[in-house]
Image (cartoon, grey):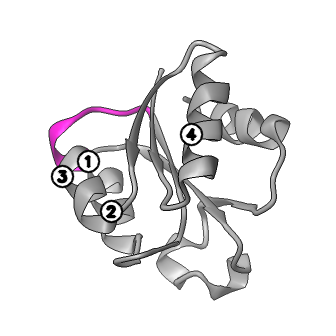
Amino acid sequence: MTILIVEDEPLIRMALSEFLESRGYVCAHAATVDNALTIAQTQTFNAALLDVVLKDGKVYPVVRALQQKGVRCIFITGHLPEELPAEFANLRCLEKPFDETAVIDAIAGCGA
């Protein structure tokens, strides 16, 4: 299974990647909306873990691009799920801080 991690905090990004890779997942990373869009358009993923607010804007264009390709998206955020646009109300949202079990459960729950 291949997972895209979109997170602008390097420590969180690396910790998620190391944790998932230790469980057999293949991970790609992005820290900005622009970089994530490029990666989303050129690579294939089973699921994506996406921080909502990145340094260059909100991640919503990336989510839309991934959804068009059938990628299951999971938000990882310090914001409340109620603050997400209505179009994303059906997506799983892990509130920071989250534990590793919640990440695995979320990925498994989306069929990845």
Secondary structure state at the residue bearing disc 4: helix
- Give the residue at x 30% y 55%: 36
Q: Amino acid at mark 3?
A: Thr
Relative horizontal placement of residue 9, taking residue 45 as reference (left or right) = right
| Quarter where residue 108 is shown | top right
The residue carrying mark 2 is 62
Residue situated in front as seen by the camera: 88 or 60? 60
* Image x and y of residue 43, in percent: 22, 35
Which marked residue is nearer to the observer: mark 4 or mark 1?
4
Name the residue type under label 1. Ala
- Foreground mark, 2 or 4? 4
Among the 4 quarters of the image, the one containing residue 21: top right
**Is label 1 in a helix, a strand or a loop?**
helix
Magenta-tinted stretch: 40-46
Q: Residue at x 25, y 56 (%)?
A: 35
The mark found on residue 38 in the picture is 3
Dot 4, how many residues are within 10 Å of its Cα: few (below 14), some (14-19), or many (20+)? some
Q: Which mark is residue 40?
A: 1
Question: Which sits earlier in the primary sequence, circle 4 or circle 1?
Answer: 4
